Image: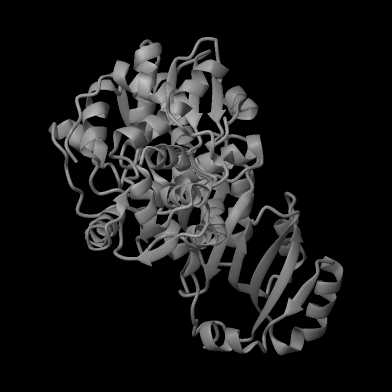
Amino acid sequence: MTTSKLRPADYLIKILNARVYDVATESALEPAKNLSRRLGNQVLLKREDQQPVHSFKLRGAYNKMAHLTPEQLKKGVICASAGNHAQGVALSASRLGTRAVIVMPTTTPQVKIDAVKGLGGEVVLFGDSYSDAYNHSVALQKKQGLSFVHPFDDPDVIAGQGTIAMEMLRQHQGPLDAVFVAIGGGGLISGVANYIKAVRPEVKVIGVQMNDSNAMIQSVAAKKRVTLPDVGLFSDGTAVKLVGEETFRVARHLVDEYMTVDTDAVCAAIKDVFVDTRSIVEPAGALAVAAIKQYVATHKTKGQTYAAILCGANMNFDRLRFVAERADVGEEKEALFAVTIPEERGSFKRFLELIGSLPGGPRNVTEFNYRMSDSDKAHVFLGLSTSAKGESTKITANFNKNKFQAIDLTHDELAKEHIRHMVGGHSAMSQDERLLRFEFPERPGALLKFLSLMRPGWNISLFHYRNQGADYGRILVGLQVPPKDDKAFAKFLETLGYPYAEETSNPVYRLFLRS
C-alpha cells in the first residue's frame, strides 16, 4: 500500500467516527489488584480478551469492511491472518452478509481455525508464518476479485483499533503514566499511539515484542522496514516477519519506547493475569503485562499507573501444560540445577538435609530426577522453589561449598525444554531393583520420613518427582531390595502409610528403564 500522510489529528477524527460497535463491545478497564500490590504500582488491564471473538481484531476488521461499497461487499473479502484478525473478518462478514476467505498459516492453533469456520469463514491454510499466508492471499485476491482486509497496514483498520485508546482515556480520568501495547504488524499500537498523542501526549506509549519476533524494533533501529528470516511461534498472534508501511511510519514517530520479553516472562504473565481475572490469555495477550513487570524491575518505579492491553485470549488448551511448566521459572519462583552427589550410603539423605537448611528459609523441592549410572557419583536434576530473582546463583554456591558439585540450569533452554524429561534410561548397576509409584503428601519432611524408615542396605537406584500443584506428589522410586528382604520391605511399606503401586512387572519399565 502507499504510505499515507495522515497526522495524529487526522487519525483522531477517523477514530472518533469509526464504526466498531455493531460487533465490538466497550471492554472493561480493570485494576489488577494482586499484581499492583506486588509491584507497588497500579496496573490496569484493558480486557480485549472479553470481545465476542476474544480479541481486539474485530474492531479494525469491521471498520474497514463497513467502509466498503455495496459492490465490493457483494464480491466478498479476503484476509491473511494468524487467527484473531481472521475471526474478526469472519464475524464482520456474517454481520454484513458477505463472503469471507481467510488464508491462515499452517502453524495456526486449531482453536482459531475452528473458530473461523464456526463463524462462516472459508479457511485456506498456507505457509509457516503470516507473511507466507499474506503473499498467497494477494494472489487469491487478484484471481477472485475480492477486497483485501489487511490485519494491520490500513488506516481504517488502524482507526478501528484506536477506539481502544479512546475508551481507556474515557474510562480512566486519573493519572496514567504509560500504556503498554503488544506489537505484531503494528496496527494496534499505531491506533493507540495516534489517539493518545493527539489527546494526552504526556502519556507514554511503550511497544512490546517477543525477543524472537521483533520486526518493528529492528525496523525502527534501522530506519527502514526489516524483514526477519524467521519468527518465533510461541506468541503466534505477534509472529510477523515484516511490519506494515503505514504502521512503521506511525510507530517510529509516535511510540516512546520499545521492549522485548521472552517466553518464560510471558508464561509468568499469563499466570499473573489468571490470578487477577481467572481468565487465560494467549501469549500475545500477556506481552504487555510481562513488559510492565520488566519495566518496574528495571526502573524501580513506585506509585505509577500503567495500563496493559490484554489483546487476545485464543489459547490452545494443549499449550497450558507448557505455560504452567515455565511460569514459575519465568517469575524466578523456581530454580533448576544439575547436582553431582557421591554414590555412597547416606549421601542422598545428607543432600536433602542441606536443602532444608539453605539460607532464605525452607524451600520446596519442585523436581527431583535421578537414575543410577555410575558407581562413584550420581547426577541429579533438581528443582527448588525460590522467593526472589537471582537466588539460583547463591544456592549453587552453597551446594558447591558443601561438596555437592552444582550447575545452575535456571536459564538453560535445553535443560528446561528437554533434559528434564529425559533423565533416566537403562542401568546395568540396578540389580534386584523394584519399581514403585507413590503418592507423597505435599508437605515438608515427607521424603525424609521415607528415607528414615528405609533399611540402610536398600539403595535408591531411580527417583523421579515433579510438583504438579496438588496436595500430594506423585513419586516414582527404584529401590534395590534383595529377595531375602521381601518381608521387611512389605513391613516398610505398611509402616510408611503412603499409597503406592508396584510397577516392577510393567512392560514400559522393562523396555525403557530396566537392563
Q: Which residue lies at the image location 52% right of the left edge and 60% below the top edge?
A: 111
- Closer to the camera, 292 or 513? 292
Q: Which residue lies at the image location 40% right of the left edge and 20% below the top edge?
A: 299
Q: Is residue 515 left or right of residue 154?
A: right
Quadrant of the image for the N terminus? Answer: top left
Task: Reply above or below: 282 against 376.
Answer: above
Task: Reply above or below: 188 against 280.
Answer: above
Tell me if I can see residue 446 in this picture: yes
- Closer to the camera, 296 or 306? 306
Q: How is the image coloured?
A: one colour
Q: Which residue lies at the image location 43% right of the left edge and 63% below the top edge?
A: 122
Q: Quadrant of residue 463?
A: bottom right
Q: Residue 426 in the image: x percent, y percent?
A: 49, 82
Q: Quadrant of residue 350?
A: bottom right
Q: Residue 483 in the image: x percent, y percent?
A: 72, 89
Q: Residue 233 in the image: x percent, y percent?
A: 36, 55
Q: Residue furthest front?
A: 71
Task: Reply above or below: 100 against 327.
Answer: below
How many numbered badges does the structure rendering display?
0
Q: Is residue 44 left or right of residue 489?
A: left
Task: Reply above or below: 24 against 98.
Answer: above
Q: Residue 515 in the image: x percent, y percent?
A: 52, 88
Q: Is residue 10 left or right of residue 445?
A: left
Tell me if I can see residue 410 in this picture: no
Q: Which residue lies at the image location 57% right of the left edge and 88% below the top edge?
A: 510
- Closer to the camera, 343 or 95? 95
